[in-house]
Image: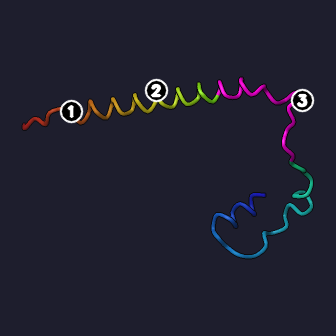
Amino acid sequence: MKALLALSATDEQGQADDTDGPALDRYEYALASRDDPDVPPAHVHFLRKIAERQQWKAQRDAAMERLRLLSATPNQAA
């Protein structure tokens, strides 16, 4: 898998080295159903995403405030 990602990242054409061999075909991915016990209900997922965005916004606002304080400092000639 890493070899395939490396090829796609570098836009190289050709085959990846077969170090993984048939291991690439070992997994089959499918969408989870609503009845899957590993999938939280939709409202839980959405609330987690909202909380994550609020945390990002708070971090961004704190960084912007630090930047504002740094740029607002008057230049003093020595």
N-term mark: 3 or 2: 3
Image-based side of 26 in relation to 77, left or right: right
N-term mark: 3 or 1: 3
Residue under pointer 3? 35
| Residue 24 location (% of width, % of height) | 87, 58
- Identify the residue at image location x=43%, y=33%: 60
| Residue 12 location (% of width, % of height) | 67, 73
On residue 58, which mark appears? 2
Image-based side of 36 in relation to 53, left or right: right
| Location of the N terminus (image quadrant) | bottom right
In this rendering, the answer to whether 40 lies above or below 14 is: above
Please say if the residues under marks 2 and 1 sit with CB atoms less than 8 Å apart. no
Mark toward the viewer: 2 or 1: 2
In this rendering, the answer to whether 5 lies above or below 39 is: below
Kind of residue at badge 1: Ala
Residue under pointer 1? 72
Badge 3 density bin: few <14, some 14–19, many ≥20, Cα 10 Å: few
- Boundaries of the magenta span: 30-48
Name the one closer to the observer, 3 or 69: 69
Q: Which residue reaches farthest bottom?
A: 14
N-term mark: 2 or 1: 2
- Identify the residue at image location x=63%, y=30%: 49
On residue 2, which mark appears? none
Q: CA distance from mark 3 to mark 2?
A: 35 Å
In this rendering, the answer to whether 72 lies above or below 5 is: above
Please say if the residues under marks 3 and 2 sit with CB atoms less than 8 Å apart. no
How many labels, in total? Answer: 3
- Identify the residue at image location x=59%, y=25%: 51
